[in-house]
Image (cartoon, rainbow, N blue to C red):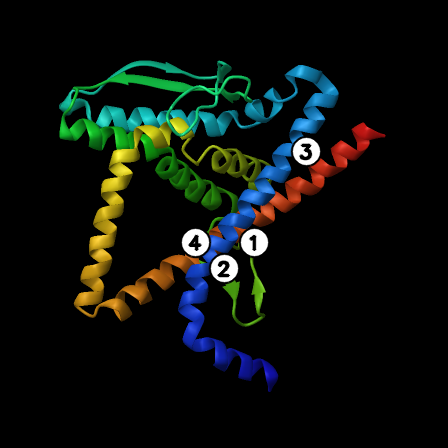
Amino acid sequence: MPNAQIMTEIAPYQSWLTIAGVFVLFGLLRLTRKGLRRRVDESGYRLFRSKGPLIWFWLNAPGVIIHELSHAFVVLLFWPFGFRITSITLFRIKPIPQRNAYGQVMRGGPASLQLGEVQYVRPQRALMSFVGDGISGVAPLLGGTAAFIFLYWVATGYNLWDIPLDSVHSSFKILRPGWPWWTLLFAPYLILTVTSELWPSRQDWRGARWFVAMLTVLLICAGVAIWYYNLTSAVLTIATFAASRLDFALLILVALDLVFLVIAEAIVQLLRS
């Protein structure tokens, strides 16, 4: 059978294809999310002119809350090391000028908008200050992921790592048997907003750059140690399992994006007519 022959030929590379799928689906998700934002921005411009771009930010208000509270939570965790929150701001539009690679403001360039902000103080030139800055910078990625996992359970009744396939009927079950259907009326929107604000901003990455650099070096050293002690097979098995769950999560997000894209495109076409 041709299908069986293809699967046999692919089998030796299945683990690497599963891992590569994470990067492919992540790239696809970035494209669909950008396309969705363009359509929302166009609809906003046609309805509210110069204030149109604010529509996207207000739609993502729940995600902004999770984003900023993730920063604040990490700062509170580092309270014993001298970290102190000075202010938490939500839902205040603040223009942020674009900067070049040297941190200089680019005159005449497009400015991005910031809806929330957490400001804090900490000891200068201390190791834990660099660690705290780094973890605080990437905190939205952690907090947003946790919120996504929780909202997926609220929506479907399944855990994200339990792929709900019916092996008998070879079908995918959206809802756990007996789970209320009305959770699908609001949870997909919340998942969209949380994941839209999940990625750390440029300012967040700038604050976390030393921590990320140190973590990258440690990962490279770990990779060398895995290769040296011949642990590649065991680590690849674990990585493949994790990648398969990430693939599933990203597929869900891409599917949601496509649904919202169809709705946004219909609204744009209606406003154009």
Q: Specify which label sits upstream in the sequence, 3 or 4.
A: 3
Q: Indicate the quadrant where residue 15 lies.
A: bottom left
- Calculate the distance from the C-alpha at mark 1 to the C-alpha at mark 2: 7 Å
Identify the residue at image location x=70%, y=38%.
263
Q: Of callouts 2 and 3, which one flags the residue occurring earlier in the amino acid sequence?
A: 3
User: Callout 1, which amino acid?
Assistant: Ile
Please give the residue where the numbered disc 2 appears in the rendered image.
Answer: 164
Q: Is residue 90 left or right of residue 127?
A: right
3 or 1: tag closer to the N-terminus: 3
At 21% from the left and 56% from the top, the residue drawn is 222
Disc ID at residue 39: 3
For disc 1, the marked residue is 174
Q: CA distance from mark 3 to mark 1?
A: 28 Å
Q: In the image, what residue type sits under mark 2?
A: Pro
Q: Secondary structure at mark 3?
A: helix
Report the amino acid beneath label 3: Arg
- Verify CB contact (< 8 Å) between mark 4 and mark 1: no
